């Protein structure tokens, strides 16, 4: 999969566009800026938006092509982000060091997903927030051709996220149809799961 993402991100065009995810933008507007982590951040569109809003941004991905594109865009825009080349299972942060974690289409296999989601809770400060948008298993239906993994095990239901983040206070948990306009690979009707949760 690393080779797949390096190939996808190596093209000149940004494959998911340059604008931030709509749900992320809405949720960040409700929070005071602080230190935020973007796992599996790809080309950096969401991390760069957060940096432009005054957040101290940490990001990681295992695609070097995605990282290089994100850092080039950051330089062009005069923004500063810390972007690490890492797989999720190898990434570490200090306990209670983050004000927010934004998981935007960061799909992990079940063997990794639950442990990584629980690890992120440890990294959050009390009062810190998780913002998540990911494809739901309904995305595999023919009505939804807007992108995402083709393996149901990589897609998230509300129940899955409720269990993964049971240590947090869930403020919003939705399964809903959306219209995506995020570059050539996220375009059209989609079915997603959204979560906003805070650490007590």
Image (cartoon, helix red, strand yellow):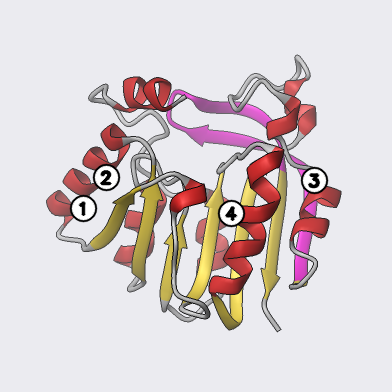
Q: Are marks 2 and 1 in contact (CB under 8 Å)?
A: yes
**Magenta: main secondary structure:** strand
Residue, disc 2: 70
* Mark 4, secondary structure of its residue: helix
Residue 78 among those drawn in magenta: no
Residue, disc 3: 175
Rendered residue at 68%/64% (across/down): 196
Rendered residue at 68%/33% (across/down): 154
Sooner in the amino-acid sequence: mark 4 or mark 3: 4
Sooner in the amino-acid sequence: mark 4 or mark 2: 4
Q: Quadrant of residue 108?
A: top right
Sooner in the amino-acid sequence: mark 3 or mark 2: 2
Residue 184 as seen in the image, left or right of residue 77:
right
Q: In the image, which residues are magenta?
A: 170-192
Residue 129 as seen in the image, left or right of residue 142:
left
Q: Quadrant of the C terminus?
A: bottom right
Residue 102 as seen in the image, left or right of residue 4:
right
Q: Could you say where residue 161 lies in the image, as x and y percent from the top left?
A: 77, 53
Q: CA distance from mark 4 to mark 2?
A: 20 Å
Residue, disc 1: 74
Residue, disc 4: 23
Residue 191 among those drawn in magenta: yes
* Mark 1, secondary structure of its residue: helix
Q: Are marks 4 and 3 in contact (CB under 8 Å)?
A: no
Rendered residue at 53%/72% (across/down): 123
Position above or below: 14 against 108: above
Counting every numbered tag in the picture gives 4
Q: CA distance from mark 4 to mark 1?
A: 22 Å
* Mark 2, secondary structure of its residue: helix
């Amino acid at each position: 999969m690393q080779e797949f993402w390096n190939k996808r991100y190596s093209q000149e065009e940004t494959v998911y566009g340059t604008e931030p995810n709509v749900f992320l933008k809405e949720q960040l507007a409700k929070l005071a800026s602080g230190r935020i982590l973007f796992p599996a951040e790809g080309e950096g569109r969401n991390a760069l938006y957060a940096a432009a809003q005054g957040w101290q941004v940490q990001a990681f991905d295992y695609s070097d092509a995605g990282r290089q594109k994100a850092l080039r865009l950051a330089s062009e825009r005069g923004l500063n982000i810390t972007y690490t080349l890492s797989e999720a299972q190898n990434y570490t942060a200090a306990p209670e060091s983050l004000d927010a974690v934004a998981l935007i289409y960061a799909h992990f296999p079940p063997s990794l997903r639950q442990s990584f989601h629980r690890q992120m809770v440890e990294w959050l400060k009390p009062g810190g927030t998780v913002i998540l948008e990911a494809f739901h298993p309904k995305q595999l239906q023919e009505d939804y051709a807007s992108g995402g993994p083709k393996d149901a095990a990589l897609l998230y239901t509300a129940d899955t996220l409720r269990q993964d983040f049971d240590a947090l206070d869930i403020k919003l948990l939705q399964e809903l149809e959306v219209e995506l306009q995020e570059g050539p690979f996220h375009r059209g009707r989609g079915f997603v799961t959204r979560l906003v949760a805070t650490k007590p």
